[in-house]
């Protein structure tokens, strides 16, 4: 591709990054805190594209250079860019969750429970309090947790959130096994808001032998997928 075509590709890539950063699309790729860097990268690419196009136009005017056309196959480089612009990838779901071991980590300390009844908790917060805190902070308090469903081969239902450090490429699942008053129809990848109570029952993840605590469900209802499908609470 000649310099002008390269400038066009740079411009489109920069525009795609700005579009992703200006909307919630970027949350399918990277953590929320990287949004300023994504927008800055898009602006830099657009500036580089404009500078390249201006330099090439000026050089042609001065020297009258005639360039031979480049192989058309080089334009295939645009396909990944068009995919980024036109296709929003789904967030990682039950397929990835069941093939990866739980990423639950023991916290250094537990903060006070949020106000409310039931107590709103993330999957990571409930799982760590149940598995490593032995539910001491959860006794006598109903909790409300939101995540997507995963069903293993035995039919065990899990409430899952994919936790990430940086981007979707390093996302790993944190799982809560569900028991009690489950909905009659369970659909993998459906998002549920589950209300329940702590139970000391604990399973081991068959992938990495990590702890998977149980939650005794008293009620559950379907909810829309959240704006940010990934959970970043473990690295805040």
Image: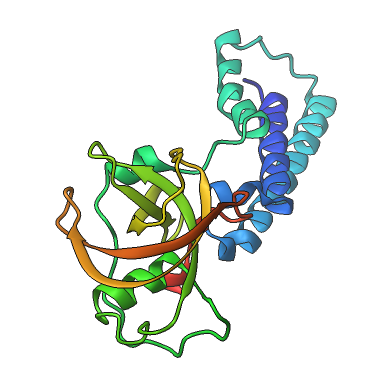
Query: Does residue 123 sit above or below 90 in this rendering?
Result: below
Residue 88 lies, with reference to residue 211, above or below; the image says above
Residue 51 image position (x, y, % from top left): 75, 43
Count of numbered circles in the view: 0
- Which residue sits furthest bottom? 112
Is 212 rendered above or below residue 82? Answer: below
The chosen color scheme is rainbow
Q: Tell me if residue 171 can be seen.
A: no
**Along the line of sight, the residue nearer the viewer: 155 or 33:** 155
Give percent across and percent down for residue 58.
82, 33
> Where residue 79 sits in the image (x, y, percent)?
58, 22
Which picture quadrant has residue 176?
A: bottom left
In the picture as drawn, the residue positioned furthest to the right comes out as 61
Of the pair 60 and 70, the residue shown nearer to us: 70
Q: Residue at x 24, y 52 (%)?
A: 101
Looking at the picture, how far across and down is residue 136, in whole percent?
30, 86
Visible residue check, residue 166:
yes
Q: Quadrant of residue 83?
A: top right
Position of 48 relative to 203 (above/below) = above
The residue lying at 34 percent from left, 46 percent from top is 97
Q: As rendered, which of 210 and 1 lies closer to the eye?
A: 210
Q: Quarter of the image containing the N terminus? A: top right
Instruction: Specify whether 30 is left or right of 210.
Output: right
Q: Nearer the viewer, residue 125 or 162?
A: 125
Task: Decide if residue 28 is on the left or right side of residue 174.
Answer: right
Please give the name of the residue rendered at 31% of the width and 80% of the height, measured from the top-left corner: 107
Determine which quarter of the picture holds residue 178: bottom left
Identify the residue shown where x is 60% and y is 9%. Answer: 72
Left or right: where does residue 151 sit relative to residue 2? left
């Amino acid at each position: 591709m000649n310099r002008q075509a390269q400038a066009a590709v740079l411009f489109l890539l920069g525009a795609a990054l700005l579009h992703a950063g200006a909307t919630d699309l970027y949350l399918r790729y990277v953590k929320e805190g990287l949004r300023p860097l994504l927008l800055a990268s898009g602006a830099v690419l657009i500036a580089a594209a404009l500078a390249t196009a201006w330099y090439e136009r000026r050089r042609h005017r001065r020297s009258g250079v005639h360039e031979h056309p480049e192989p058309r196959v080089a334009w295939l480089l645009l396909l990944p860019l068009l995919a980024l612009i036109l296709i929003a990838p789904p967030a990682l779901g039950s397929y990835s969750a069941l093939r990866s071991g739980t990423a639950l980590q023991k916290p250094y300390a537990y903060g006070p429970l949020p106000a409310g009844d039931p107590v709103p908790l993330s999957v990571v917060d409930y799982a760590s309090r149940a598995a490593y805190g032995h539910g001491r902070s959860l006794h006598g308090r109903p909790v409300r947790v939101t995540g997507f469903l995963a069903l293993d081969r035995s039919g065990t239902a899990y409430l899952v959130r994919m936790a990430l450090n940086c981007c979707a490429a390093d996302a790993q699942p944190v799982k809560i096994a569900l028991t009690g008053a489950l909905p009659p129809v369970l659909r993998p990848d459906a998002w549920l808001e589950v209300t329940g109570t702590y139970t000391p029952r604990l399973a081991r993840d068959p992938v990495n032998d990590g702890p998977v605590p149980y939650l005794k469900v008293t009620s559950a209802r379907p909810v829309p997928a959240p704006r940010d499908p990934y959970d970043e609470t473990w690295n805040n």
